[in-house]
């Protein structure tokens, strides 16, 4: 018996229409109906409830901070260079430094937004920490 080979003909590829970002976003909005959602409307009672919960959270946070104890040797301690914060936005940016023997200093930068924290450290060879008018300065 002789085998007959079938000739395979490739199917033509579909033409893909270029899709724009606006088309995708418009389609998603139409599917979810997000554009039909009513505006968030808070009455005074709901606003007062939210504010009282926030005040209770703030007082609990402050009570926990006041219970923190620190013991150090004044040599191997981080010295505060700068701190910027905003309690309403729950955001802070802190720069600290610590001397490493006579070799240099380590500078640590931390930014916290809510519960998310980003931090980085760098060693500065031959850097010095000097106290000027009660404030620590990197030289």
Image (spheres, rainbow, N blue to C red):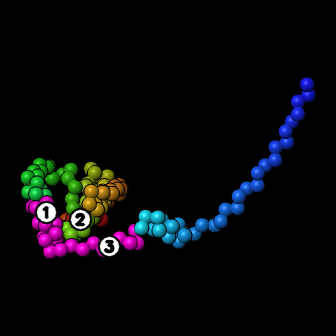
The residue singled out by tag 3 in the image is 38
Q: Secondary structure at mark 3?
A: loop
Q: Residue at the location (26% across, 60% down)?
A: 114
Q: Which class describes the residues within 10 Å of circle 3: few (<14), some (14-19), or many (20+)?
A: few
Instruction: Report the predominant secondary structure element of the magenta stretch.
Output: helix
The residue singled out by tag 2 in the image is 90
Question: Between disc 1 and disc 2, whose residue precedes?
Answer: 1
x and y, in percent, of residue 31 in the image: 46, 64
Q: Quadrant of residue 86?
A: bottom left
Q: Secondary structure at mark 1?
A: helix
Q: In the picture provided, is 74 more to the left or to the right than 113?
A: left
Image quarter in which the N terminus is found: top right
Q: Is residue 3 above or below residue 106?
A: above
Q: Decide if residue 81 is in sight here.
A: no
Mark 1 or 3, closer to the camera: 3
Mark 1 or 2, closer to the camera: 1
What residue range appears in magenta?
34-59
x and y, in percent, of residue 22 in the image: 53, 71
Is there a contact, CB below 8 Å, between mark 2 and mark 3? no
Numbered tag placed on residue 53 in the rendering = 1
């Amino acid at each position: 018996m002789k085998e007959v080979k079938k000739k395979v003909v490739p199917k033509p590829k579909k033409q893909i229409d270029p899709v724009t970002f606006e088309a995708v976003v418009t389609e998603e909005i139409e599917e979810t109906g997000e554009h039909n959602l009513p505006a968030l409307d808070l009455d005074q009672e709901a606003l007062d409830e939210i504010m009282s919960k926030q005040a209770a959270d703030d007082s609990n946070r402050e009570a926990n901070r006041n219970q923190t104890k620190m013991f150090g040797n004044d040599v191997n301690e981080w010295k505060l260079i700068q701190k910027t914060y905003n309690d309403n936005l729950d955001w802070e940016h802190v720069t600290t430094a610590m001397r490493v023997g006579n070799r240099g200093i380590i500078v640590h930068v931390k930014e916290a937004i809510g519960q998310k924290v980003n931090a980085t450290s760098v060693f500065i060879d031959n850097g010095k920490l000097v106290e000027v008018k009660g404030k620590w300065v990197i030289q």
